[in-house]
Image: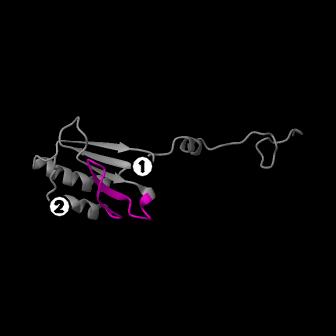
């Protein structure tokens, strides 16, 4: 036995702190918001239908710190025709899901993605 104090024992004043590495990394770079599999299935079902009708040609998915965005394009290299956004911070207020047009105007917003995606059941045409 030695008379040296245990530096890892609680209450010691060594100045050293043990930190969980996973928690430390999450605090530095939070996990981005993502679409879950069922959400992507619902979005891609509509996307596939519209591609089959020749309305849409390309898409992009962005997972950001505060929201996830599914952008829909008529031609790649242009501004997106529509953006389907998931913003968890708005879940308790207007709803986490929204569909926006090219100009950023909200076409539909709600708490449930299938209800919000019904905006595409109507024939939407881009007016130029």
Q: Residue at x 23, y 37 (%)?
A: 78
Residue 95 or residue 114, whichever sits in front: 95
Tell me if residue 89 comes above or below residue 72 in the rendering. Answer: below
**Depth-wise, is mark 2 or mark 1 nearer the camera?**
2
Callout 2: few (<14), some (14-19), or many (20+) C-alpha neighbours within 10 Å?
few
**Mark 2 vs mark 1: which is more N-terminal?**
1
User: In this view, which residue lies farthest toward the left?
Assistant: 53
Kindly indicate the quadrant of the structure image that contains residue 62: top left
State left or right for residue 16 relative to residue 59. Answer: right
Camera sees residue 36: no
Tell me if residue 112 comes above or below residue 22 in the rendering. Answer: below
Quadrant for the N terminus in the image: top right
Q: Mark 2: which secondary structure?
A: loop
Kindly indicate the quadrant of the structure image that contains residue 56: top left
Image mark for residue 21: none
Q: Residue at x 34, y 48 (%)?
A: 69
- 122 falls in the magenta region: no
Write down the residue under mark 2: 121
Q: Mark 1: which secondary structure?
A: loop
State left or right for residue 30 relative to residue 18. Answer: left
**Span colored in magenta:** 90-112
Residue 36 image point, x, y percent: 35, 53
Residue 122 image point, x, y percent: 16, 61
Write down the residue under mark 1: 33
Residue 95 or residue 47, whichever sits in front: 95
Residue 61 image point, x, y percent: 31, 43
Q: CA distance from mark 2 to mark 1?
A: 26 Å
Total tally of numbered discs in the picture? 2
Callout 1: few (<14), some (14-19), or many (20+) C-alpha neighbours within 10 Å?
some
User: In this view, which residue lies farthest toward the front?
Assistant: 128
Camera sees residue 24: yes
């Amino acid at each position: 036995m030695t008379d040296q104090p245990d530096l890892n024992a609680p209450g010691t004043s060594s100045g050293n702190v043990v930190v969980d590495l996973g928690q430390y990394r999450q605090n530095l770079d939070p996990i981005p918001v993502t679409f879950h599999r069922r959400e992507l299935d619902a979005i891609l079902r509509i996307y596939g239908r519209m591609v089959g009708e020749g309305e849409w040609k390309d898409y992009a998915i962005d997972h950001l710190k505060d929201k996830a965005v599914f952008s829909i394009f008529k031609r790649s290299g242009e501004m997106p025709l529509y953006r389907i956004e998931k913003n968890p911070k708005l879940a308790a207020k207007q709803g986490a899901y929204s569909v926006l047009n090219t100009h950023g105007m909200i076409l539909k917003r709600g708490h449930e993605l299938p209800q919000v995606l019904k905006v595409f059941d109507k024939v939407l045409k881009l007016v130029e």
